[in-house]
Structures are given as C-alpha cells and as structure tokens.
Image (cartoon, rainbow, N blue to C red):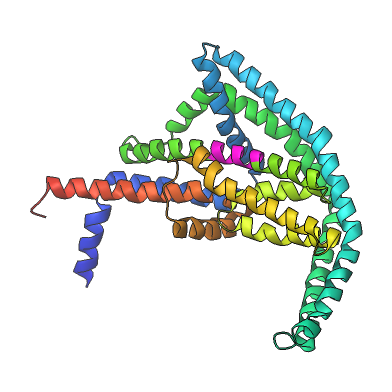
Amino acid sequence: MVNLIRTWIDRYFSNPQVIILGLILISGFLFVLYFGTMLAPVLAAVVIAFLLEGMVGWLIRLKVPRKVAVLVVFIFFMACLAILLVWLLPLLSRQIGQFIQDLPSMIAKGQNEMMRLPERYPDLVSQSQVQQFISAMGTQLTVAAQRLLSLSLASVRGVITIIVYLILVPLLVFFFLKDKEMIINWSKGFLPDHRTLATTVWQEVNEQVVNYIRGKIWEILIVWSVTWITFMILDLKFAVLLSLFVGLSVLIPYIGATIMFLPVGFIAYYQWGLSSQFAYTMIAYSIIQALDGNLLVPLLLSGVVNLHPIAIIVAVLLFGGLWGIWGLFFAIPLATLVHSVVKALVNTYSRERLEKPDE
C-alpha cells in the first residue's frame, strides 16, 4: 500500500512545474481567504483596474500614449463614480425608505391572503399549517429587524468605512493603471524561474476572465436599464430598486432570475392584486429573462466559458459560500481557473507518458 501511494506521488508530483503551480494557487487562495477582508480596498481596486485596462488598451491601439490613455480612462471612471454618488444612490435610498414604510401593510395583506388559503384549498392547506408558516415568517422578520437595528447602530463605523473606500479605491486604481508594467515586473521577482506551466494556465485564464467579466458587466447594465425602463412604463412601485436587483441577479446563473420572480411578483400583487396589470408585469419580466438567456448571454459571452451547468452551479454555491458577493461574481472565473489547471495537468502528464512510454 505504501509503495502504491509512493508510486502515485512520484508520478503526479515529481514534476517541479506542477509543484510550483500548486504552491502559487494555494498561496493565492490562503492569502485571499485570510487577508481578503483587511485588504478589501486593494482587491477592489485591482478588480476595477483590471476592467479599465481594456479601455486603456483600446486607446493605446488608437495610437494614444499610455499616460494620456490612463488619464482619460481614470477621468471617465471618476465621472461614473460621481454620477453614482450624486444621482443614483439618493434615488435608491428614497425607494428603500418608501419600501420600509410600506412593508408592514405588505405583510398584513400577505397574511390576510394566506389565511384565506384553507377556505379555498381545504384539501391541500390547513389552518394550523398557515399559522405555523406565519409564525416562522414573523420570527425571521424579527431577526432581520434586529440585524437592521445593529447595522444602524454601527452606522458611524459604516460611514467611515465608505469614506475610506471612496478615497483609497480611486487612488489605488489610478496607480495600478499608471504603473501596471512596473508592478507586474516587481511581482515576477518573487516567483520561481521554472513557471512555464503556471504561465500557460495564467494566459488561458486571463483571456477567459477578462472577456467574461467585461461581458458580465455589460449584461448587468443592459438588463438593469431595460428592466428599469419597463417597470417605469408599467408604473410599478420601487422600479429602481427592483431593476437593480434584477440586474445583479445575472451574477447567479440559473438561480438569480428564478429568485427574483418572488419579489417582483410580490410587489406587483401588492400594488394591483390579481389584475391584468399584474399579469403584464410578470409577462414583461419573463420576456426580459428569456431575451437575456437566449440572446444577450450568447451575444456577449459566446465562447468565453465552456462549462457544464452543473459545474457552474457548484462553483456558485462553493465560492459564494466562501466569499459572499465577490465569490458569486467570480464563481465562473474561478471555475474556469480550476478547469484550466486540470486541463494543463492532463496535457502535461500526457506529454510525459508519450516521452516515456515504457513507464
């Protein structure tokens, strides 16, 4: 048994390229896992600079000097940030406040409708089941209210954190864009010389991740905008808030769109009841999701990620559980990383077997 294990280790872990790749991956994973919270502004700035680098490269291809291109892109980024802070956030805060005011009446209406279920469907639902469900929901709402209260009590700390982010992140983004080559060359000095396999994996993952993230950003913006316009035309309450969450729901493939049916349907039912306007809203939302899945995603992400739906769902659950919203956003890129690593290892071992057929 010992010899079998030793033979297996010698076969798969005798290649120094494999060991170097494994050490780099494990070090990166542990670094993000243990220091990700403390270095969140730095990681956020790296992600934003990574996304903006595409615009810088596009300007450079148009014969614009890199320093000028970086300045133009950074000004564009700051303008978008200013629009977000001055126009969008106050609009969202007003809708959130209105939603909190209307929430008790929404809950009361939902309870009244649920109490009628035993009369309408006596063979399926009993009065005791409805009471148990309402009691459980009341408990969950109490816990949510306590959490909201604790957040409000820590609002001073939250404001300070937001201010720190607003100062540090743009500053870091500028320097990451401006000194990209210098930072990359400095980082390479800490890496081993024999890293051909790691470089191969990085090149494949980099191309896939860049295209995926940029495509996903465009998908979020398009779905958010179209949903917002549609809900405004239908005069649905909390259109900005609902459309924002609908746009963000595309981060969770197959799951996010299904989950968002519930709040959209709940708000539409609270506003109009079982009327034609309610039906129009749900049909419009279904059309948006159908166009997103069958037209927008293939157009923006065609050939970017070739993963089975099971692998995507497992990645969303795993990395979302580890890193929250960031894990959800990067679940598919991280799954692509795993796929590229496995593919590179298989190719490496296949070449070794061809070179040493006797073994």
| Whether residue 61 is situated above or below residue 296 in the rendered picture | above
Closest to the observer, 34 or 40: 40
The boundaries of the magenta stretch are 213-222
Predominant SS along the magenta part? helix
Residue at point 83% right, 70% down? Answer: 110
Image location of residue 16, percent across then percent down: 28, 45
Q: Residue at x 72, y 27 (%)?
A: 78
Which residue is drawn at the image coordinates 89% and 51% (left, top)?
97
Residue 217 image offset from top left, x and y in percent: 60, 39
Is residue 187 on the magenta stretch? Answer: no
On screen, residue 80 above or below 262: above
Residue 214 covered by magenta stretch? yes
Locate the C terminus and report the quarter of the image it occupies.
bottom left
| Picture quarter with the N terminus | bottom left
**Residue 261 found in image quarter:** bottom right
Q: Is residue 277 left or right of residue 222?
A: right
Image location (x, y in percent) of residue 61: 49, 16
Q: Position of residue 204 (x, y in %)?
A: 39, 38
